[in-house]
Image: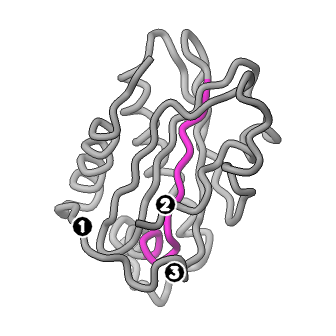
Amino acid sequence: MAIAEHEIQRLIESVWQTAFSMEAFESAPDGAGANEFLHARVSIFGAWRGVAAIACERPLARFAASQMLCIAPGDLVDQDLLDTLGEVANVIAGGLKALLPAPSLLSLPTVDGRLPDFADRTPSRSICHVIARSVAVLHGYRLGVSLVETEQAVTADLCRQLQPNEVHHE
């Protein structure tokens, strides 16, 4: 099963345009690597089994929450950011599901502050592997999407190990 990086990129851009009525655009990240990432994941079960993992820089999550919830950025609380990222993750996972063998079901999104580095903690290549990954730069901040196929039931511990490492610094 192969999903091209440009397919994920197009999906990210479509979600951004639909959810926020704004064009997605690329620009150089401000303070690359200086921002905390928030992580979300949606498990996919059925004919294909795996995880859609999302990593989003905190300032981008704050911007998205402000737009989605119509709340001034300074008035947002952390839960607003997490809720918004969960919604974005759910929509992206739904788009990815459409590219996968049917039938498949999605779990509810799980959103966390910080999770272990995927690159160093993959349990075993025989258990899971990244089949697609893309990074979008939106409003100067990074949003990374990884699609990880697993050969076993997806548990919370395994999902923690399947998060993308800090979104690629380019």
User: Left or right: 21 with respect to 107?
Assistant: left
Q: Quadrant of the N terminus?
A: top left
Q: Which residues are magenta?
A: 50-62
Which is more foreground, mark 1 or mark 3? 1
Query: Badge 3 local density, few (<14 within 10 Å), some, or many (20+)?
Result: some
Where residue 49 appears, as percent x and y from the top left, is 61, 20
Instruction: Label 3: state its secondary structure.
Output: loop
Where residue 96 appears, as percent x and y from the top left, is 41, 31
Q: Quadrant of the C terminus?
A: bottom left
Residue 39 occupies which quadrant of the picture? bottom right
Lower position in the chain sequence, tag 1 or tag 2 = 1
Residue 133 occupies which quadrant of the picture? top left
Question: How far, Cα to Cα, is label 2 from label 3?
Answer: 27 Å
Lower position in the chain sequence, tag 1 or tag 3 = 1
Instruction: Label 2: state its secondary structure.
Output: loop
Which is more foreground, mark 2 or mark 3? 2
Q: Residue under circle 1?
A: 26
Residue most extreme to the bottom:
74
Nearer to the camera, 94 or 115: 115
Which kind of residue does numbered mark 3 sit on? Leu
Main secondary structure found in the magenta portion: strand
Q: Residue under circle 2?
A: 168
106 is higher (above) or lower (below) than 12: above
Question: How far, Cα to Cα, is label 1 from label 2?
Answer: 15 Å
Where residue 141 appears, as percent x and y from the top left, is 39, 72
> In the rendered structure, are the residues bearing label 2 and label 3 in contact, judged by CB atoms less than 8 Å apart?
no
Q: Residue under circle 3?
A: 76
Which is more foreground, mark 1 or mark 2? 2
At a point 43% along the width and 60% down the height, the residue shown is: 143
In reply to whether residue 58 is colored magenta, the answer given is yes
